[in-house]
Amino acid sequence: MTQQALLVMDVQQVVVDRYPDPDYLPRLRKAVDAARAAGVPVIYVVVGFRPGYPEISARNKMFGRLAVASAAGSGASGEELATRVHPDVAPGPGEVVVTKRRVSAFSGSDLDVVLRAGDISHLVLTGIATSGVVLSTLRQAADLDFGLTVLADGCLDSDAEVHRLLTERVFPQQAEVTTVADWAAAL
């Protein structure tokens, strides 16, 4: 039997605050609760950096502004970015939190080690943003030969059309795409 894990990616308070969708967290909570009830490991992935952001090059278009802000003495600390999963879906006792350094959940993290140690061969992906962490993680996980499921309504993006295109046209080429309700019912 395939051992699966639910990945909750980039659902930190600071990220959720930038994506105002009042229905998102309750849906994601249903996925987390269903996984826990079925004994499916829930693994949280957050982005975080050391103080001073030594992992970030000023050439990095996405994260470079954090390094510049740090050099200027402003901005949130890496600790703040890395540890504040939104309280509505926060990790429970003993649940793994992986810190990544780039967009993909695998980049600069020990996620692959955690998954392999747990004999996990199938990933169920959720998170913010569909066009960021979900897309990057899906592509890398497929290259690492993981089975994949994407919970389309467990993902969120600032561009509804990009979300639709990814979940309806791109992701099905490498993953099963379903809803939180359908996935939970099948557990």
Image: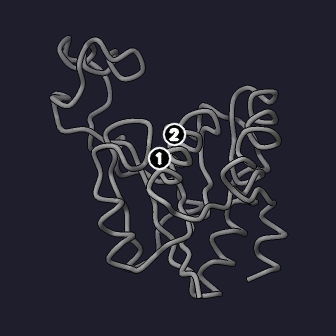
Classify mark 2: helix, strand or loop. helix
Image coordinates of residue 85 in percent, x first then y, are: 47, 54
- At 35% from the left and 72% from the top, the residue drawn is 116
Quarter of image, res 135: top right
Which residue is located at x 58 percent, y 65 percent?
147
Q: Identify the residue under disc 2.
A: 136
Q: In this rendering, is residue 104 above or below 99?
A: above
Query: Residue shown at 80%/60% (left/top)?
Result: 178
Q: Is residue 165 left or right of residue 105?
A: right
From the viewer's side, name the closer residue of 7 and 144. Answer: 144
In the depicted structure, whether residue 61 falls above or below residue 20: above
In space, the residues marked 1 and 2 are separated at their CA atoms by 6 Å
Residue type beneath disc 2: Ser
Q: Name the image quarter holding the N terminus.
A: bottom right
Quadrant of the snapshot with the C terminus: bottom right
Image quarter of residue 25: bottom right
Residue 19 at x, y percent in the picture: 66, 34
Q: Position of residue 179 (x, y in %)?
A: 81, 60
Image coordinates of residue 51 in percent, x first then y, are 16, 35
Indicate which disc residue 99 carries.
none
Q: Amino acid at mark 1?
A: Gln
Q: Are marks 1 and 2 in contact (CB under 8 Å)?
A: yes
Secondary structure under tag 1 reads helix
User: Can you tell which mark lies on residue 140?
Assistant: 1
Most foreground residue, 28 or 129: 129
> From what the image shows, is residue 161 above or below residue 124?
above
Specify the color scheme.
Answer: one colour
